[in-house]
Amino acid sequence: MSFALLSQSTPSDDKQAVRSAVASALTDPDVTRLVVEPRVAERVAPTLADETDLFLAQVVAAMMAVERLDVEIALVSAEATTATRRYGLPHGPAARDLAEHGTAHAVPLIRDDAATVVVGRARHLGADGAKLHGETYVDNDRLFTGEVRSVIIEPTVDGPGVRAQVERLLLPGRWYRGRAAQTGGTNIVVEREGVVNPRVVKRSTYYRHHVDLKLVRP
């Protein structure tokens, strides 16, 4: 087995830099595992953005774009994140040990039509702080129609691929599982790994890619 180390050297939202780094790391055809090591974010002020998960999602999207999902991926995270909790991954020294000696398992890869990937959590929100107006379906099951605070979307460790629920302030909503979660409405903005894209859209869908991700996990 041949490893390639991909250490983060640029902001996690620099897509072009991440794509170039992934392409360079995968130049060697003998590489079978990509070890991803995000940097610890230097935060001047608190932020909702999960830099580690955002960087991992960018790496996976770059691998998907060049059709190299045959390569295993291992995450060496310095701290616990939404994605590490979702996939049961360790952090710190245990993460490095797993990356070097662990076994890869196929997990659903969740993406949208713009080829962005989510590894931790996405949300469908209403623009400018307003309630989200529209409706959401997970496969054939309707989560809501009308107005809600937001819809949470997460990948699942196994099939069918995604789960979604209406976000509530008090009691948690019911999770619905399926291969796709689609929201249509009049004022949708999409948040991915804590970062909101301010562009208002009429429809957003996260769904299971036809090729799974080979993730090193316990």
Image (cartoon, rainbow, N blue to C red):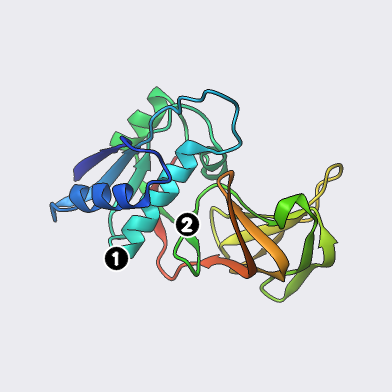
Which element type, helix, strand or loop, lies under badge 1? loop
Dot 1 surroundings within 10 Å: few (below 14), some, or many (20 or more)? few
Spot occupied by residue 176 in the image (x, y as percentages of width and height): 72, 62
Q: Would you place residue 131 above or below residue 9 in this image?
A: below
Mark 2 vs 1, N-terminal side: 1
Spot occupied by residue 82 in the image (x, y as percentages of width and height): 57, 40
Q: Residue 175 sits in which quadrant?
A: bottom right
Q: Which residue is mark 1?
A: 67
Q: Amino acid at mark 2?
A: Val
Which element type, helix, strand or loop, lies under badge 2? strand
Q: Residue 147 sits in which quadrant?
A: bottom right
The label on residue 11 is none
Identify the residue at image location x=79%, y=54%: 130
The label on residue 117 is 2
Q: Amino acid at mark 1?
A: Glu
Spot occupied by residue 154 in the image (x, y as percentages of width and height): 61, 53
In the image, is 122 to the left or to the right of 33?
right
